[in-house]
Amino acid sequence: MSHPPFGFSRLLTTALVVIFSFAAVNAQDSLEKWNEFDFGARSIKAADVADLELHKLKLLRGIIFGRHGRVFKDVAIKKYLTERSWYKPNSEFQNSQLNDTERRNLDLIRDAEASKHDKVEPGDMRHYRNKQLTKKQLGTHSRAEWTVLHAEIEAIHGKRFDDQPWLKQYFEERYWYQPNDGYDAKQLSAIERKNMQTIASAQKTQRKLALAPGDLELFENRLITTNMLKGLSLHELRLLRNEVYARHGRAFRAPWLQQYFWSQPWYEQNDEFLDEQLSGSDKLNVETIVKFEDRIHEELGTKAITRALLEGLFVEDASKMRQEIYARHGKVFKEPWLQKYFASFDWYKPDPEFTENAFSEIEKKNVATLLAYEKKAVSSLSVIEG
């Protein structure tokens, strides 16, 4: 086999370097030209951004917001904007500053991004409104990301998240979100409902859960075992327990529970249902869940919390667990949503005279352990740009 002469090889290498360098400069130029583009007055087309690489699409989105001074958490966008002479950071930026043309341009760019992602990411669900997802497309995610993906389908229709402050803040920061007091879960299409089920199933598989809120349709005539409940947070256990009643149409006094079940497509309120009517496997399943919850409650005050228990726990769940230690002693909370949350439980007895002196040594240690975990845990809002 003959080989090309050395001089030819060097010439070929030089030519390739020139070609790739030109391509890199050209790609950079293709992005730099957008720095002069008036996104508020001119509309772009899909063909204008079709050939842009994924990271450049993200930066292009950053340019539109950057013109208004938005401060990004995303490191790449933040770095790019700070290197632009025209960028003036504005911590007071609000999405209301965007006009309709800018929003349409952002929609087009965001759709292009979603189509190029290796896996579905938070912010992509509008791209999949009429496309059915598979578990393979979803890949793996953090618990915060799973929560956002699931909620995003509802947020597209304006669902409010007043009982979940971090989600409320997250969606209020999305330029496309419009809260709708008249949101009805029955507005969801068959594809959207299926996608929510697929997301819930994929999350359950990743977390190695046997059971999760929303699954009790499969347990109308089956018994839940204690092992099936392992890995669920206290919040999830409460939703699961109340789901047994909700499947019979129970109307809930607690606003946060009523709001949660109203947002489930399968929920149909039945004012004639009485808790005493619960029987058979439904009654036994509630008793199993309550017993499991009670054990966790007792351990918060009698047993040191271990790292294994906190492993992978959502930071908001850890916070609620810590606040529950206070609530068990009657603390009155300043935050309205937190006060309403604990006031919805029969065991909560407000005590205006509460002090931390009422804590046992184990409770003090558990509060410190949970607080340390919360401080180290990355906030769900800081890791998801959406």
Image (cartoon, rainbow, N blue to C red):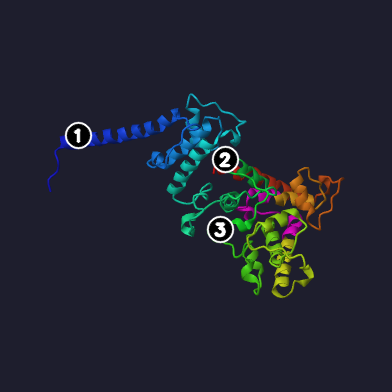
Instruction: From the image, tell me which residue sits under label 3.
Output: 189
Q: Earlier in the sequence, mark 1 or mark 2?
A: 1
Instruction: From the image, tell me which residue sits under label 2.
Output: 175
For the residues marked 1 and 3, what is the alpha-carbon distance in whole angstroms? 60 Å
Q: Does dot 2 land on a helix, a strand or a loop?
A: loop
Residue 105 percent location from the top left of the image: 48, 38
Q: Earlier in the sequence, mark 1 or mark 3?
A: 1
> With 375 as the anchor, is 142 left or right in this view?
left
- Number of residues whose C-alpha sits closer than 10 Å to that of mark 1, classed few (under 14), some (14–19) or many (20 or more): few
Q: Does the CB distance between marks 1 and 2 fall below 8 Å?
A: no
**What amino acid type is highlighted by mark number 3?**
Ser
Residue 304 percent location from the top left of the image: 71, 54
- Residue 104 appears in the picture as rendered: yes
Residue 325 percent location from the top left of the image: 76, 51
Q: Which mark is residue 11?
A: 1
- Residue furthest top in the image: 85
**What's drawn in magenta, residue-wise?**
296-319
- Residue 378 appears in the picture as rendered: no
Q: Earlier in the sequence, mark 3 or mark 2?
A: 2
Q: Does the CB distance between marks 3 and 2 fall below 8 Å?
A: no
Q: Does the CB distance between marks 1 and 3 fall below 8 Å?
A: no
Asked whether residue 363 is drawn in magenta, I would say no
Where 136 sits versus 55, above or below? below
For the residues marked 1 and 2, what is the alpha-carbon distance in whole angstroms? 51 Å
Q: Does dot 1 land on a helix, a strand or a loop?
A: helix
SS majority, magenta: helix
